[in-house]
Amino acid sequence: MTTTKKTFKTGAWLPIAAAGALLTGCAANQPKPLYQWDGYQPQVYEYFKGQKSPEDQIDALEKALQQIRAKGNRPPPGFEAHLGMLYASVGKEQQAEQAFQAEKASFPESSPFMDFLLKKKSAAPQPKPQAPVQTQTHAQQQ
């Protein structure tokens, strides 16, 4: 018993208590994540597996994007670019361009790739309106 009393009197317990308090304080103050990944990773996985239609994926990603922004967070890199690719795959060219521009603004390092996609999108052949077919009558042919 004398050794126990002697240890507490000399203050050997003080460093142990300080370390415990320090570790507890650090665990409580974890930094806020830089990006919010809500729904993005599962949607990319499903895209590559071909489990959902592009329209279903667009709906899911649009909802996730609304939730991310409602919480005051930022979508992760590639989120809006992936959404833009989905828009382009279903013919929503204007929305695709907006998504690519948003990705480019959020992540300037993606500019070369976004510029490539925007250029490719604008160079794609646009469907031309068909002129009405004029049929010749038997009298016109002679």
Image (tube, rainbow, N blue to C red):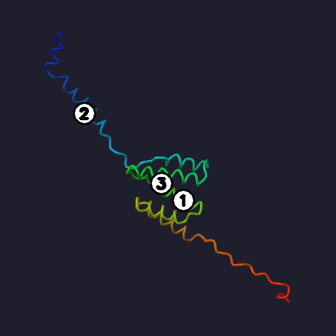
Residue 118 point in image, percent of width and height: 51, 67
Q: Earlier in the sequence, mark 1 or mark 3?
A: 3
Q: Is residue 80 left or right of residue 56?
A: left
Checking the image for residue 79, the label placed there is 3
Checking the image for residue 22, the label placed there is 2
Residue 81 point in image, percent of width and height: 49, 58
Q: Amino acid at mark 3?
A: Phe
Q: Residue furthest left?
A: 9
The reply to whether dot 1 and dot 3 touch (C-beta < 8 Å) is: no
Residue 54 occupies quadrant: bottom right
Mark 2: few, some, or many residues within 10 Å (few <14, many ≥20)? few
- SS at badge 3: helix
**89 and 72: which one is in front?**
72
Up-down relation of residue 132 to residue 35 (above or below): below
Q: CA distance from mark 1 to mark 2?
A: 47 Å
Q: Amino acid at mark 1?
A: Met
